[in-house]
Image (spheres, helix red, strand yellow):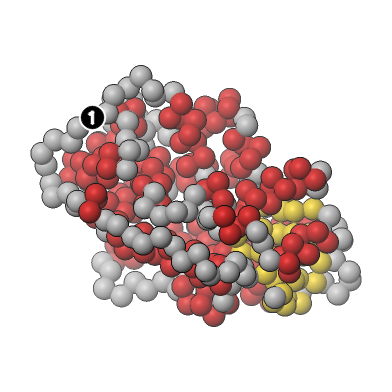
Amino acid sequence: MKNKLLALLMAFITLFGLVSCSSGPWIPNYDSISFESLDKTTECTPLLYKVTDGKGAVLYLLGSIHIGDERTQSMPDYVMEAYDASSYICVEANIVAYEKDVAKQMEDLKDLLCEEGKTIKDYLGEDLYLPARKFLQSRGLYNAVYDMYKPALWSSLLDEAVSSYTDLESEYGVDRFFINKAAAEGKEIREVESVDFQNDMMNGFSDELYRLMISDMVYYPKSNVENLLSMYETWLRGDEAAIEEMLKIDYTGAPEEQVKLFTDYNKTMITDRNVGMANKAEEYMADGGIGFYIVGLAHVAGEGALAELLRGRGYTVEKVS
């Protein structure tokens, strides 16, 4: 959710100049990284489940992705038929409404400011700060104002730097597409979580975890771009087995302290949220009717995800194609 604040932040920093990078640790040559354009021949056939309770309530469960290209704007018939049959949609958070609330965004940005007397360098250390800054500069994303903000914002900035090597944009996110469509048609939009919930969660992660995540993006940008492209390709194909394989985590060879950090992160980010999303799905299904439930792909398929959880709670879950 933090990346939704970036456009607003940038609007307030036009008077600040860019800062050149000084000598320091080894810094990858980010300008040398290049990728071929995405294969645009892959059709959009995302994973969709139909959940029923045997009493007439139906919930269509769509695995979403928050970044994409023009193909997310032309969903296949089986997805659109499910959407059209639904009287309401559910999304993790109504990001479109949030982006219109400038006062709320400015208030949330305050939570990302460094502690008094500190800058981001105090959180990252010079050996990580310098290459992180260089990465942002190489993608035209750095401004001196960012030094006033905590690692959570830098993590989002670096996510954007990674995605800038591709043709994928957040404007083509699946949740955004359906929020805009539902709003234009007057269809009810419900939230599974909320912006505040997601912001609090991201602000709650430790500086140690963010340093590890930022280090990975800074020193291994090529593999991060490759993973992003592979993830999008897998989402497009909607191959259930491939999705489940993609979501498996291999900690082989990782130091014990890193394994603990990422295990705790995945519990908060995925496992615990899956339970909350399943509870919310049951709550909405108890009202009866037909709904269209859109949450991130990692929450839909695989071990401990919504399809499995809802089956375990007695619902019928079938793949739609």
Give the residue at x 25% y 36%.
122
Amino acid type of disc 1? Val
For the point 45% across and 54% down, the residue is 167
> Which part of the image, by quadrant, shows the C terminus?
bottom right
Which residue is found at the position 27% from the left and 28% from the top? 18
As drawn, the residue found furthest toward the left would be 23
SS of the residue at dot 1? Answer: loop
Q: Residue at x 47, y 53 (%)?
A: 168
Is 310 situated above or below 107?
A: below
Q: Position of residue 182 (x, y in %)?
A: 75, 48
Q: Determine whether, in the image, residue 8 is placed left or right of residue 129.
A: right
**Quarter of the rendering containing residue 293:** bottom right
Residue at the disc numbered 1:
19
Q: Nearer the viewer, residue 45 or 195?
A: 45
Q: Position of residue 82 (x, y in %)?
A: 77, 64
Q: Is residue 250 left or right of residue 3?
A: left
Residue at the top extreme, as displayed = 15
